[in-house]
Image (cartoon, helix red, strand yellow):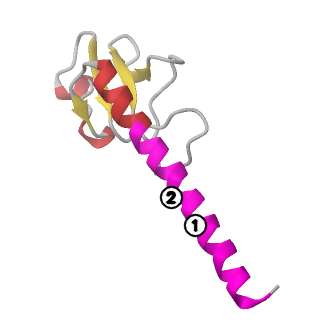
Amino acid sequence: MDYAELAFKEIRRSLEAQRVRIAKIEESVSDREASGFPSVVYADLQYSADGMSQFSARFVSNGRKAGEGVGVGTGVPAWYDPSSDAWLTFSLDTAVTV
């Protein structure tokens, strides 16, 4: 295999990785639009210490879906559970992670 073939192989690999990233971003935008909830980043979520005392829903724009790696969440719809003082994902009722 010559250098040109190796270069094209690497370019194809890089393009596929970019395609996957774009698909995740598009999915996130679709989820956010479908949720109809205000969008926030995880760090801006409020808890009981901030005055939260009743059910609330948000789209956590950097929350992780199942299978997404740490720090690369594409966003999840979430709800606040005052009895546990936690933000939970709608899909699994588990704590939102980023």
Q: Which mark is residue 14?
A: 1
- Residue at horizontal 65%, vertical 81%? 7
Residue 38 picture location, percent across and down? 21, 26
Q: Secondary structure at mark 1?
A: helix
Helix, strand or loop under label 2 = helix
Residue at the extreme right of the image, as rendered: 1
**Residue tagged 2:** 18
Vertical order, 61 against 56 (above or below): below
Q: Is residue 33 left or right of residue 9?
A: left
The answer to which image quadrant residue 13 occupies is: bottom right
Q: Position of residue 80 (x, y in %)?
A: 33, 18
Residue 63 position in % (x across, y down): 41, 37
Q: Pick the quarter of the image with the C terminus.
A: top left
Q: CA distance from mark 1 to mark 2?
A: 6 Å
Q: Is residue 13 magenta?
A: yes
**What residue lies at 25% left-to-right and 22% top-to-bottom?**
48
User: Which residue is at 39% across, 36% downward?
Assistant: 28
Q: Is residue 83 above or below residue 87?
A: above
Question: Up-down: is 44 above or below 16?
Answer: above
